[in-house]
Image: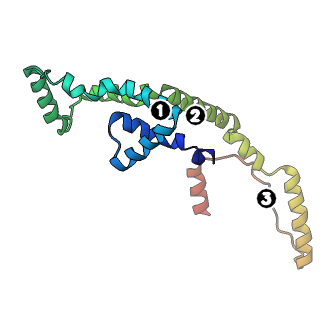
Amino acid sequence: MNWFLNSCRRNRESLCLLASGLLPEPDRIRIEKHLAGCAACRSYYDEIKAVTAPLAGWEKHFAQIEPGAAVHTRLTKTTRLAGRPEPVRRLAPGMILVECWRQLILPSRRIWAGLAAVWMLLFAANASLHSGPQTAVAKSAPTSEMISSFRQQEKILAELIGQNELRATAAPKPFSPQPRSQRRFEISAV
């Protein structure tokens, strides 16, 4: 709110334009009226005028300087080449890896090192959590208690259904894990 009420602050930019001679006529009259009544703005204007006065006539001071033929040639060559695309470089097959290293990996070494560390941690965690195939098969193999419990349940079921004859059960074969290819043949043969 104080900014809007302080007219001196609003006139600072206009004072700089007035000192450099770039302020339009209607604004120049208003600022000159303000300068007539404000000592602080008048001193600020005098400081700005002291800085900008030597720069105001720079065209007159440097009019005698002309660029030489070499500068003119270099400027025209640069101007012509500015619109052309950069030529495509052909790389040898061995240089492709060197270029990839120089442009992709080298500028962001810390990022690649961090990613490598994360991958190593994930690999270590995966290796420690992975149990061998033998333990998984051993956990799923039926125990002798389970087999005897199954036989008892089979006898009870046979009595309830009404079959007086119990079929002769063969001794269970010991379970041994087999590769998938052999299991597939056993399943299809049955």
Q: Is residue 105 left or right of residue 60?
A: right
Q: Residue at x 21, y 35 (%)?
A: 86
Alpha-carbon span between mark 1 and mark 2? 69 Å
Residue 111 image position (x, y, % from top left) = 52, 30
Q: 136 or 61, which lies in front?
A: 61
Q: Secondary structure at mark 1?
A: helix
Whether residues under marks 1 and 2 lie with C-beta atoms below 8 angstroms apart, the answer is no
Q: Is residue 58 left or right of residue 9?
A: left
Q: Which residue is mark 1?
A: 42
Q: 121 or 59, which lies in front?
A: 59
Residue 73 image position (x, y, % from top left) = 9, 25
**In terms of image quadrants, where is residue 154?**
bottom right
Vertical arrangement, residue 30 with respect to residue 150, above or below: above
Alpha-carbon span between mark 2 and mark 3? 53 Å
Q: What mark, if any, has residue 119 been given in the picture?
A: 2
Q: Residue at x 50, y 30 (%)?
A: 112
Pointer 1 or 3: first along the chain = 1
Q: Which residue is mark 3?
A: 170
Alpha-carbon span between mark 1 and mark 3? 118 Å
Inspect the image, locate mark 3, and give the three-letter code of the amino acid beneath it. Ala
| Label 2 crowd (10 A; few <14 / some 14-19 / many >=20) | few
